[in-house]
Image (spheres, helix red, strand yellow):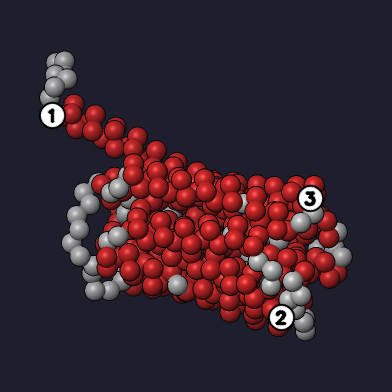
Amino acid sequence: MKQDPTSPSTDSASTSIDVRRAALRFVLLISVLSFFADFTYEGSRSITGPYLETLRASAFVVGAVAGFGELCGYALRFFSGRLADITGRFWPITIFGYTVQMLSVPALALTGSWQAAATLIVLERIGRAIRNPPRDVMLSHAAKHMGGYGWTFGVHEACDQFGALCGPLVIALVLAHHGKYHEAFAVLLVPALITLGFVWSACLLYPRPQDLEPAFIDQGPPTSYSRAFWVYLVGAALVAIGFADYSLIAYHFARVHSVPSAVIPIFYAVAMAVSGGASLLFGRLFDRYGFPVLVGLTMVASLFAPLVFLGGFWVALIGAAIWGMGMGVHESIIPAAVTPMVPPQRRASAFGLFTACYGIFWFLGSAVMGFLYDHSRIGVIVFCMITQLMAVPLFLWVSRNRSLSSEG
């Protein structure tokens, strides 16, 4: 019998298609604004070190500012996530965070002392901490209609990393033609304003992203997280503590002359390109196969350490690419895995807690690796590999005791 086009089932199917299209447009809109955001702040971060040096900052100051900025950039997410859950005001918190971050970057063009520059560098990280948890929650609401959490966060992270690739390259071009850091920072005002324009557009077009999630009912926050969440958090912390920051890798390349100084930024660009591709590919695979994908990738990512710290030019390039793959996996699969473990009403707090712990342990691990490097490169390699591989049995436990597909 021919289906009546005015029947309820037809209306339901039409509504479902409209919601899927809206979810896709929302994810793409957030991904594009993230491209310009990463273009802005990664472009800035590619030259803040040498810029501080021109302002007569010591190596200790450069390291302390970078380390403290990263600590704030992760630890404060716990509080912004809690605030978002308690107030339910996801867009105002997100907009405020993006505004602080985007205006801090071009403001560096107006600085004349390392103290002023350091303040803005840390403020940029604080802005990122404020906006990330509520933004990730809003993205998660569209995941069901996008095909899965891994694919949704993978698409977003790919745009992130493409921006992280383009920003430093444009800054390098500006410096090659003008040679002044202040002009390079000033150029970043353009993508910063574009980012803010996209943020406001997304807010006006999608004031309630939670409506994109099927059967979303606000029942108030539960009292505690599941055991799987805490086990996964410990595993992710072990991965973080053994994952070297690129600044240490670049320092090693320059110190042992395994990579020419002019090529070190290109290695970083390669790593960012691999990171973006890995986010898409492994995000999709994670949606299909679950935690076994994360287990395998954790084991492969641990190989970056011997390759970058012991290898010559080409081996080090492979190591940098594997490091970039690990970065892409961390940035896309980690939030994708957390999302189904907690109810929608608690996601912002969960994202904030999770990324805060992840960042704190990454900071502590970086400090340990810096200390070890001064005494033994082999010690750094052993530390990196052991801590990351220790996470594997924990991920296997979560894989066996929780089906993400059934509980997502």
Question: Could you tell me which secondary element the residue under label 3 belongs to?
Answer: helix
Question: Marks 1 and 2, Cα distance to the nearest angstrom?
Answer: 68 Å
Residue type (three-letter) at the residue carrying disc 3: His
Residue 209 screen position, x and y as percent? 31, 48
Residue 189 screen position, x and y as percent? 59, 51
Q: Residue furthest top?
A: 2
**Residue drawn at x 37%, y 61% as measured from the top left:** 93
Residue 49 screen position, x and y as percent? 71, 67
**Which numbered disc, 1 or 3, marks the residue that appears first in the sequence?**
1
**Which numbered disc, 1 or 2, marks the residue that appears first in the sequence?**
1
Question: Marks 1 and 3, Cα distance to the nearest angstrom?
Answer: 64 Å
Give the number of the disc on residue 178.
3
- Asked if residue 305 is positioned above or below residue 371 in the image, the reply reads above
Which residue is denoted by mark 2 in the rendering? 60
**Residue drawn at x 40%, y 72% as measured from the top left:** 78
Q: Assess disc 2: are there few (<14), some (14-19) or many (≥20) residues with their C-alpha within 10 Å of its C-alpha.
A: few
**Which numbered disc, 2 or 3, marks the residue that appears first in the sequence?**
2
Whether residue 213 is visible to the viewer of this picture, yes or no, is no
Residue type (three-letter) at the residue carrying disc 2: Phe
Question: Could you tell me which secondary element the residue under label 2 belongs to?
Answer: helix
Q: In which image quadrant can residue 241 be found?
A: bottom right
- Asked if residue 154 is positioned above or below residue 84 in the image, the reply reads above
**Residue drawn at x 29%, y 45% as measured from the top left:** 212
**Residue drawn at x 44%, y 61% as measured from the top left:** 97
Which residue is denoted by mark 1 in the rendering? 8
Quadrant, the N terminus: top left
In front of the other: 337 or 260: 260
Residue type (three-letter) at the residue carrying disc 1: Pro
Q: Assess disc 3: are there few (<14), some (14-19) or many (≥20) residues with their C-alpha within 10 Å of its C-alpha.
A: few
